[in-house]
Image (cartoon, helix red, strand yellow):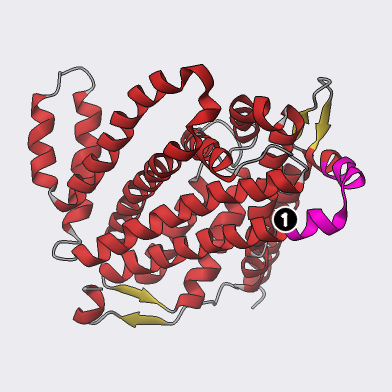
Amino acid sequence: MQNNKPKKLLRIGIKIAITILAFYFLLSHEIKTESGEKISVLSAIVSHLAEIEAAVFIPLILCATLIKCVGIFSSMIRWHILLTGQGIRFNFGHIVGSFLIGRFLGTFLPSTLGLDGYKLYDASRFSKDMVRPAAATVIEKVMGLSGIFLTFLVTLPFGYTILGENAALTIALTVPIASGVVGGLFLLLFKPTLVQKCIQIMPSFGRKKVETFINKAANAAAAYKNQSRLLIKVAVLSFLVHFCTAAMYYFTALAVGAENAYFWQISFASSIQIFATVMSPFTIAGEGIREIVQALLLAKHIGTSESILSAALGFWAAEAVTLIGAFFLWKRGADYAPKELIATPSEEAL
């Protein structure tokens, strides 16, 4: 017992440090106002709260949080389904806890590193198998990327006006690319050998990197052979994950008093912002990138401060749920173990 005490104290110390750092990064992130002054997110929120009616602000933020919850819940179900397809089945309560811990850790890690890394560690640790959770993670990333581009394509016809005079050229360039990415990713999952043959006709420059990704994804997809229904469900859930996030920013824009906020314009701009945030490895949980992209796309339509603050509030609306992960992080001790069930053949063919 005495030998375990230092380890237990160290574990508690690490948890305290992580908790403090998470709140520090959340509250101290700085944004620029219209006058060029730099203020913290907390200061901006407090300042804006003094200018608007709480009776308007609070319900709209709650709506933003609710629609983000739908997206987070869809992501949890997606991970649960992917693991089940690999023959790994945990009770859903464990999935929820692990997912929220991963999101909590990801609040101060680049891109989606915290969530992806923790989910993979968690599933590998308790299943005692690294290969199957890794395969599930690869497919999740592929489907997640398709979900972002699908959100872009669905919102574009209704929100492209934010592009102004460059709309026609931007659409001509981006729609074929986005459609090609979505089609290619689906083809990769359902007909991986065909995609592997296609890359042979690519120019040699850059082919090796693409080929590595294709082969990795194809090998992961092979684990879901004859599970088309499962992959279709995952595709639908992936769209919901990102569409709900994009829609969330409409409610945060209304909450900060953006008078010219229109649902499809905000959602379309947010789909681009989500892509930039997810792909950026340089910022903590996308902080900074989120506000910059949203301001570039929406400043002329809803105002600079409104676009920046709505993006920052979007982060908060999402993190309000994520912070629950701190509870699960504290609660799960060294002796914690999930209720693991063995998937039956019928479950594997969801």
Q: What residue appears at the point 58 percent right and 45 percent down from the top-left corner?
A: 263
Q: In this view, does 128 lie to the left or right of 206?
A: right
Closer to us: 137 or 61: 61
Q: How many marks?
A: 1
Closer to us: 121 or 92: 92
Q: What residue appears at the point 45 percent right and 42 percent down from the top-left corner?
A: 155
Above or below, 349 against 137 in this view is below
Q: Residue 338: where, in percent of width, then height?
A: 47, 78
Residue 177 belongs to the span the image colors magenta: no
Q: Residue 314: where, in percent of width, then height?
A: 66, 47
The residue stretch that appears in magenta: 45-61
Query: Does the rendering let one see residue 16?
Result: no
Closer to us: 39 or 120: 39
Amino acid type indicated by mark 1 = Ile
Q: What residue appears at the point 69 percent right and 58 percent down from the top-left corner?
A: 320
Q: Quadrant of residue 322?
A: bottom right
Q: In which quarter of the image is residue 349?
A: bottom left
Q: Is the magenta stretch mostly helix, strand or loop?
A: helix
Query: Does the rendering let one see residue 169?
Result: yes
Say which quadrant the C terminus sits in: bottom left
Above or below, 128 against 249 in this view is below
Say which quadrant the N terminus sits in: bottom right
Q: Residue 342: where, in percent of width, then height?
A: 29, 81
Q: In this view, does 14 lie to the left or right of 89?
A: right
Q: Is residue 309 left or right of residue 46?
A: left
Q: Quadrant of residue 33?
A: top right
Q: What residue appears at the point 83 percent right and 38 percent down from the top-left corner?
A: 44
Closer to us: 326 or 286: 286
Task: Provide the secondary structure element on which disc 1 rests.
Answer: helix
Q: Residues within 10 Å of mark 1 (few under 14, many from 20)?
A: many
Q: Residue 3: where, in percent of width, then height?
A: 63, 71
Please give the residue where the numbered disc 1 appears in the rendered image.
61
